[in-house]
Amino acid sequence: MMEQNPPPHTYMSAGMYNAKLRVTDNDGAFDVDTVSINATANLPPVAVLSASPTFVYLGDTGSASVDFDASSSYDPEGTSLIYRFDPEGDGSYVNNGTDPIYDHDYSETGMYMAKLKVEDSDNDTDYDSVLISVYRFSTTPVDSAGAVGQYTSLAVVKGNPAISYYANTDLNYVRASNASGSRWGTPVTVDSAGDVGACTSLAIVNGKPAISYYDSTHADLKFAIARLE
């Protein structure tokens, strides 16, 4: 018995093909028919990665979690995708299966180029990445002379952080000697006439540090500004 249905054929290259069929009967008579085949190549998937948050601030200990979302990734042909995540950008991908959501805990400071790799059913892949910046708060003693810092106000004065604060019933002011605030100058007393300096607020007025504060002794609201005269 002759085979009625030929086996399926796989086109190895994209293009237009005129597939032909020839049938022959027992008397040797035959006929031919053709059909146009438009063979298209597999379209690769598209990887789209987002993260929240992208700026992470750690305390003095512990870690913080970042949520990665690849749900906007897609395959133009509609097939399902496999998602692999490399949260630290070191080439170590975690196979997350068909789940586009992934979270990762960061415990070390640094700049991490987190990556996503998506793969379709034909093993075609695409990549996307997002930068994660991880910072840790560091503390620097500014003034430890007694009961200081109950009331404070922070501003940037000529590029460096500066603080007005309540210090042992006085109003004090101090400015860092660098922009990061890792080194500080010597505090100066702005007002010591009574119990002053509560509820302080520091701002820049005409390019100079200015402070509003409460004088508890006289129940007054006061204002101080740095002057040349």
Image (cartoon, rainbow, N blue to C red):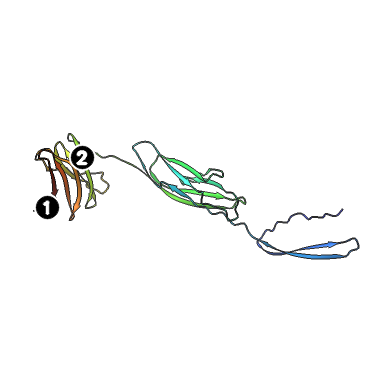
Compared with residue 122, is residue 194 higher up or lower down, i.e. above or below? Answer: above
Q: Secondary structure at mark 1?
A: loop
Give how far across and how far down residue 171 sits, in percent.
15, 41
Toward the top, the furthest residue is 146
Q: Which is more foreground, mark 2 or mark 1?
A: 2
* Mark 2 Cα shell of 10 Å, populated few (<14), some (14-19), many (≥20): some
7 or 100, which is in the foreground?
100
Give how far across and how far down residue 219 sits, in percent.
12, 40
Mark 2 or mark 1, earlier in chain:
2
Amino acid carrying mark 2 in the image? Tyr
Residue drawn at the location 20% of the way across and 52% of the way down: 204
121 or 80, which is in the foreground?
80
Give how far across and how far down residue 106 sits, in percent.
42, 41
- Which residue in the protein does label 1 denote? 227
* Mark 1 Cα shell of 10 Å, populated few (<14), some (14-19), many (≥20): few
Compared with residue 67, is residue 22 higher up or lower down, i.e. above or below? Answer: below
Quarter assignment of residue 60 = top left
Q: Secondary structure at mark 2?
A: strand
Figure disc tally: 2
Amino acid carrying mark 1 in the image? Arg
Q: Is residue 143 left or right of residue 45?
A: left
Cα separation, mark 2 vs mark 1, equals 24 Å
Q: Is residue 91 left or right of residue 154?
A: right
Residue drawn at the location 14% of the way across and 37% of the way down: 169
Q: Is residue 11 left or right of residue 221?
A: right
- Which residue in the protein does label 2 denote? 151
Give how far across and how far down residue 223 sits, in percent.
14, 47
